Image: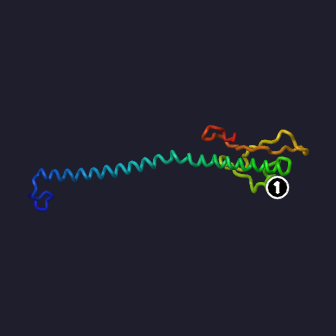
Amino acid sequence: MVMGSVCSGRSDSCCDASIRSCVQLSMRKFLAISAVLLGGALVVLSLPIWKPEIPYRALERLLEVNLKTMRDVIQQYHGDKGTYPESLEAMIDAGYLRKVPIDPFTKSRETWRLKYERRTIPAGIRGIVDVHSGAHGTTRDGRPLSSL
């Protein structure tokens, strides 16, 4: 027997068992580390699948809030003045809005689709009675964004 050997003073079968148990422990550690790394990789790879859903939901909600605000302001303007506003800028000039909100899907203040009243006011001008998004596409539940 060699001095300083791991198995000094033991039989060969005992030494083989010790080596086997050491190798098995190393393999278990390797497998555990591999499983953690593989799980982490799967999580990282699946993040892009979830990520777009969150901002889209937020954009839909922001569009709904902006539309409700403008519709409420149009009704307030009509209630106070007895006529509908000629333009969105008329509501700013009269102090009903600070600025025209941005359509979160088109990222513009200029793409709102305005619905005018059928009859004209005495000066021959029709007022805005409703507003819709000028965005193309659909909501998560399938409705056109322009129908909100």
Q: Is residue 59 left or right of residue 128?
A: left
The outermost residue toward the bottom is: 4
Q: Is residue 43 left or right of residue 120?
A: left
Q: Is residue 107 left or right of residue 85?
A: left
Using a 10 Å C-alpha cutoff, classify the residue at mark 1 as few (fewer than 14 neighbours), some (14 to 19) or many (20 or more).
Answer: few
Q: Nearer the viewer, residue 143 or 46?
A: 143
Q: Amino acid at mark 1?
A: Ala
Which image quarter is the C terminus in? top right
Q: How is the image coloured?
A: rainbow
- Asked which secondary structure carries label 1, the reply is loop
The outermost residue toward the front is: 79
Q: Eyeballing the image, is 113 above or below 101?
A: above
Which residue is located at x 31 percent, y 49 percent?
31
Which image quarter is the N terminus in? bottom left
The outermost residue toward the left is: 1
Q: Eyeballing the image, is 74 above or below 9?
A: above
- The residue wearing badge 1 is 94
Q: Nearer the viewer, residue 56 or 65?
A: 65
The outermost residue toward the right is: 122
Which residue is located at x 51 percent, y 47 percent?
48
**Relative image position of residue 4 (x, y in whole percent):** 13, 62
Which residue is located at x 80 percent, y 48 percent?
87
Q: Is residue 95 left or right of residue 10?
A: right
Q: How many marks?
A: 1
Q: Nearer the viewer, residue 136 or 76?
A: 76
Q: Nearer the viewer, residue 67 or 101?
A: 67
Which residue is located at x 22 percent, y 53 percent?
22
**Relative image position of residue 2 (x, y in whole percent):** 10, 59
**Relative image position of residue 50 (x, y in whole percent):** 52, 46
